[in-house]
Each structure stands twice: as structure tokens, then as C-alpha cells.
Image (cartoon, grey):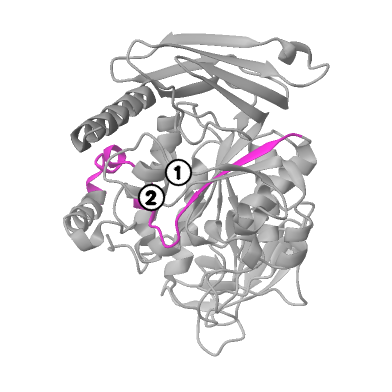
Amino acid sequence: MSCQNVAFIAVFALIAATSSARGDVKLPSLIDDHMVLQMGREIPFWGWAEPSEEISVTITSKEKNAGENQKPETASTVTAADGRWLVKLPARNKPGSVEITIMGKNTLTLTDVLVGDLWLCSGQSNMEWPVSASLNHQEEVAAAKYPSIRFFKVERSTARTPQDDNVGQWVECSPETIGGMSAVGYFFGRELHLRLKRPIGLVQAAHGGAICEAWTSQSALKQDEDFAKILERSERASSDPNQANNPNRASVLFNGMIAPMQMFSIKGAIWYQGESNVMRAYQYRKLFPLMITDWRRGWGQGDFPFLYVQLANYVSDKSKPDHPVEPEESAWAELREAQAKALSLPRTGMVVTIDLGEPRDIHPKNKQDVGRRLALSALKVAYGQDVVASGPEFKSMKVIGSEVEIEFQNSGENLVLHGEELKGFAVAGADKKFVWAQGRIDGSKIVVSTAEVSAPVAVRYSWGDNPEGNLFNRAGLPASPFRTDNWTGITTENR
């Protein structure tokens, strides 16, 4: 056979193989063996095949005595001209194990699929922080034998336009797999799994150092002129070849890591981010709620539960009552305030971690308590359970002579001090100069005062980079930092 004929045959074979591959039904990486499907919602399946190809998807229970879940369900469609297809199967209202069969020109069978609750775990490095680097990691890894907890870790990806697919793989939770997974996500999911007795799926889509606007779509950012500089900076960076993989550009993480999964039904999302937006904390008041609303709009599931972690204490030790200097302004405190304001959105929950940080490490190792507190928030917000899910929150203040009476909600059967003396409260008069105050507990109220301020007008609590507040409720949850004034902060003009 001549070399020319050999070359022709090789090219023909390549073309035939490519044509065959194009005819095959293909699925996004999120739809695969070992995945978790969201219970109680329509179950979407989508993918790619030849135009006008008939596609059917069948879900079959693998459980014994599964009742209504025992009946196989099938949905069919015809692939569109661009090769895309989408079907939706009826909701399955009980947890369990199922098998999925997708038929077109080829047949795909997905096994070891569970029906339970699926949570998105997103944010920056503290969400990305692995179990193998958390507190007591050796014991935690060895004990991670929960085959009904599944992880899908989305590979880091940036893109200038929304993508169709991302890269990742479903794995069972085991000592062999858990070490590299999100510690916050795992401890959150483990708590829910043990309390609710159902499979839990955790989709980890996090990127260290990422700014909030990187997770927000272009269409959402363009709605507000306040974000014009964000878009300008992003455009300049995107035109620089050296910035092609820079995650700190508007929308690039949304496009590469969030958009590809927005057809998939989820229970809700947990979020740990904010450090990279600290110097634009005032802007975060609008940016963060915009991102939440943007995600909810993209998923089309209404106001799904969105639970997030307020920034922990970090950096200096200056803003403490036993420090020689007076209370200081703090960009970190302003960011925490911006996070707290997002609670005005429906079905949101905020976890306070002001007691869990490490002054010299932006990645505190105690991710167990962060996950546990997120789970408490989920039990209340997502599952409607009557649990104490947050620490004391400022409700109102009343000036009585030289004292200020502060009332709290979520006091959890009265307020508790961790220590002998109340710390973290500062009082100011009309001159706006804050002075450390003394105080006492009175049921669900705190009474504070200082001899240096005879006519108080404002109170702040745990307002600083690394404050030393010690107010909790009887459930062991810390009071949220707050201020009663609305005086101009140090990040107000930053865009």
C-alpha cells in the first residue's frame, strides 16, 4: 500500500471517528455517576447531540420499598439545531438511590446516583481551604466515612463569556477523597447529613483571593453606574495578554464556574468571601446583594436559601478596650456591616465568626464551628426548624441620662458574657469621638456608659479589625458587630 493511500485511510478514519463522536449524546461534567439530585424539585438533564436527534432520559429507583419513587419516569425531546437538548423529569420527594439512562444514538447509564439536597459552596480562599489544613485534620480525615455525602469540585476557570460546561468530578466522601475538599463545605454538609438523615451533595466553586464582582454577571453589573469603574478596570485588564487568567476581573468567575451549572436544581448556597473587597466595603453594600439577586435570577428557582459567613477577626490588636489607643475606624468592620445589611434580602442567613479568627492568619483553622453555624442557619432558613441560629443582634437603643440601654434580639434565653467584664463596647457624644465603655447585662439588654461621655449619642460594638467583644447568647453564638451611627466611614468614596 502506498504512503499516499495510508495517509488517506488515516485521515478518513479520523473524520469518521470525529463524526461518530459528534453523533454521541454528551453530558456536562456535573451530570455523572455518584451525583446528587435535588429532592423536591424538577430534575433537569441537558447536553449535546446531533441536531434533530431524539433523546430520552429515564430515572429508575434502586431502593427497595421506595413507594412513589419506585416508578420509573421518562422524559423525551428532540435536539435543537445547535445540538443542545434539555428535559425535565418530575420531582422525587424522598431521598434514595436512583439510576439514570440517557438514550440517543448511543446510550449512557449513570449509576450510584442519590436523591437528597444539593448545596453550592462558593467564595474565596476560606471556602476553598481544605480539610487537610483545618483544625485536627488528621482525625477529621480518618473519620470522614460518609458515602452519602458527595463532592463535586469545580476546577478554577475564568472566561470572558458564560460557558456551557465546567471541569470537575463527583466523588464519595471518604478518608481517601476528603482531604482536598472545602473544609467549611464538608463540616456544613456533615452536620446536615447527620441531622436530616439524607444524602448531601456539595458543589465546591471557589477561588482564592477572588473579588465579589468576579462572581457577578456582566448584565447585572451594567445595571448600576456605581459599578462603572469595576467594568472599566476589568476591560483594561482583559485587553492585557498577561491578565488572561486573572480572576479579579468582572464576571470572569461567574462565566467560567457558575453559569455552566445554573440549569441544575439546588437547595441553596453557602458563601465565604469579602476579604478582597474590604477596601471597598461601602460599595459592597450594593455589590453583594446584587450578586445574590443575580444568582437567584439565573437559577430561576426564586429566592433559594443563601447563607454566608461574616468576616472573622483579623489583622491588628488595636481595637480592644485594654489597648492604650482609642477605638479606631476599620474597613474590616465596615465590610462586616455591609454583609449584615444583606440580611434584608429574603431567605438569607449570616454566620458571625468574630470569635473564630486568628490575628496573624487570614485563614483561621477552625472551620468546624464555621460549618456548624452555617448548618444551624440552614436548619432555620432552608428547613424551617425552630432553632437558635444566630447570636444576639442589635435591635434598638435608648439614651437614659449618661447611660445607653441597648436591646437585642436572638438573645437565646438571655445574654452571656465570656469573661468577667463586658468588652467591646464604645460610646461617643456629638463630637463623634468614641471612648471605651463599661457595661452590664440586664436580661436581653445591655446598659453601657463611660464617665468621659456625659451625653452619649452613638454606640459601637466589636467595631474594629480584630475586636475583643465577648457577648454571646446561651446557645454559644457570638453577638454580631454593630454600630448605631451612620457617620461617614473610611471606605465610602472607594470604587
The image shows residue 369 at horizontal and vertical percentages of 70, 59
Residue picked out by circle 1: 167
Q: Is residue 386 visible?
A: yes
Outermost residue toward the front in this view: 1
Report the disc number at residue 153.
none
The residues tagged by marks 2 and 1 sit, at their Cα atoms, a distance apart of 9 Å
Quick check: 352 left or right of 156?
right
Quick check: 472 left or right of 28?
right
User: Is label 2 in a helix, a strand or a loop?
Assistant: loop
Dot 1 amino acid type: Val
Residue picked out by circle 2: 157
Dot 1 alpha-carbon crowd within 10 angstroms: few under 14, some 14 to 19, many 20 or more: some
Q: How many marks?
A: 2
Outermost residue toward the bottom in this view: 324
Query: From what the image shows, is residue 175 above or below residue 81?
Result: below
The image shows residue 98 at horizontal and vertical percentages of 68, 23
Residue under the point 71% across and 58% down: 477
The image shows residue 404 at horizontal and vertical percentages of 60, 65
Dot 2 amino acid type: Ser
Query: From what the image shows, is residue 308 above or below residue 40?
Result: below
Q: Where is residue 356, by image quadrant?
A: bottom right
What segment is highlighted magenta in the picture?
Answer: 198-226
**N-term-proximal mark, 2 vs 1:** 2
Q: Nearer the viewer, mark 2 or mark 1?
A: 1
Dots 2, 1 in contact, CB < 8 A: yes
Quick check: 216 left or right of 314?
left
Quadrant occupied by the N terminus: top left
Quick check: 271 left or right of 236?
right
Q: Is residue 453 visible?
A: no
User: Is label 1 in a helix, a strand or a loop?
Assistant: loop
